[in-house]
Image (cartoon, rainbow, N blue to C red):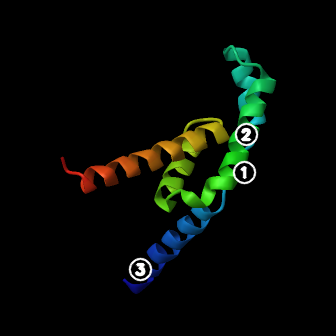
Amino acid sequence: MLSAIYVVLATGAHLVLVAERMPQVNFEAACHAAAGASWRSEDECSQDEKTAKTTLEQEWGSFDADQKGHCMRLQQVGGMPSYVELLTCLEMGKALKELNQRGRANPG
């Protein structure tokens, strides 16, 4: 029983540590694939990814650890990872949390 508790604690601690580090994303393959399937060029996609990466580097600490973990798991499920998608997920989660907090503060 005690060893099971240690496993749970170690796993939870590992997830928190992973969420604290911004993931490195190989977006080139996603941009190459997107260029053939959309109106955006590969260069435009790459520029958007680089801009999103810079924003994430600057704002990573402002996002909730649970939301980081959630968005990072979504990156693994959805095919090709993207800084743009990661940033969008984190910003949506942050906005939802702020709306919920305002709703509780002003129950109307």
Rounded to the nearest whole Å, what is the CA distance between mark 3 and mark 1? Answer: 31 Å
Secondary structure category for the residue under label 3: helix
Would residue 2 be visible to someone looking at this image? yes
- Which residue in the structure is indicated by mark 2? 51
User: Mark 3 touching mark 1, by CB under 8 A?
Assistant: no
Q: Position of residue 105 (x, y in %)?
A: 27, 56
At 70% from the left and 53% from the top, the residue drawn is: 57
Would residue 23 be visible to someone looking at this image? no
Secondary structure category for the residue under label 2: helix
- Graded by Cα atoms within 10 Å as few (under 14), some (14 to 19) or many (20 or more), the crowding at tag 2 reads some
At 65% from the left and 36% from the top, the residue drawn is: 80
Whether 89 is drawn above or below 11: the answer is above
100 or 1, nearer to the observer: 100
- Which residue in the structure is indicated by mark 3? 5
Q: Where is residue 28 in the image (x, y as percent from the top left)?
A: 78, 34
73 or 58, nearer to the observer: 58
| Image quadrant containing the N terminus | bottom left
Amino acid tagged 2: Thr
In this rendering, the label closer to the viewer, 2 or 3: 2
- Graded by Cα atoms within 10 Å as few (under 14), some (14 to 19) or many (20 or more), the crowding at tag 3 reads few
Indicate which disc residue 24 carries: 1
Amino acid tagged 1: Gln
Residue 66 placement, left or right of 82: left
